[in-house]
Amino acid sequence: MAIVPSSDPAQYRVTFFFGPEAVEERPDHLRCVFNVKKRSWKGGVQVAVDVARHHLDRARERIGYASWLAELLHSGHQEEREELTGRADDLFVQSLCTSALNLALQAGIEQVNQQIDAATFADELHQLLGEQPEQLTDRIRLELDLGETSEI
């Protein structure tokens, strides 16, 4: 992937396309795909963002995801909790991929369909999780339309 000089992420319009889904050639990875359009481009591009399952496990552990989610879903029926847990897990992957895409946009991307490899922003994502885990958890909470919880 060619990266161009640093860019303002506000210049881009990003639309989630699909995912997470297993990467056929890498069963230990998941992929989310986004449509990205920059104001100066005539058309948009598709950007696939991969994340390794071991990075997901590490990210969940780093922010205390399981306990955060359990606290968030503590009320409600068992059936509803199971459904929301599955949806939250997908949203967690999507949020992590979105964060990686945002890092790529900050670095600047070319107007070509591309894939961001799982290892590309692994260190930056790990740092983000340590400093601002709410960037991931707020997306999940808002998408599931669930109330505030205590800090992670």
Image (cartoon, rainbow, N blue to C red):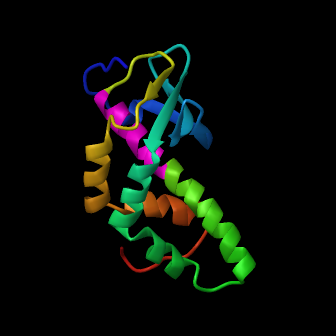
Residue 121: x and y in percent read 32, 39
Q: Is residue 135 visible?
A: no
Residue displayed at 29% across by 52% down: 126
User: Residue 101 or 13: which is nearer the viewer?
Assistant: 101
Residue displayed at 59% across by 54% down: 90
Residue 5: x and y in percent read 25, 21
Classify 3 as above or below 136.
above
Main secondary structure along the magenta-highlighted residues? helix
- The magenta-colored residue range is 95-107
User: Residue 31 or 44: which is nearer the viewer?
Assistant: 31
Classify 29 as above or below 115.
below
- Which quarter shows the N terminus? top left
Residue 101: x and y in percent read 42, 37
Relative to 128, 69 lies left or right? right
User: Residue 133 or 122: which is nearer the viewer?
Assistant: 122
- Total labels: the figure holds 0
**Is residue 33 highlighted in magenta?**
no
Residue displayed at 29% across by 30% down: 107
Classify 77 as above or below 58.
below
Relative to 2, 127 lies left or right? left
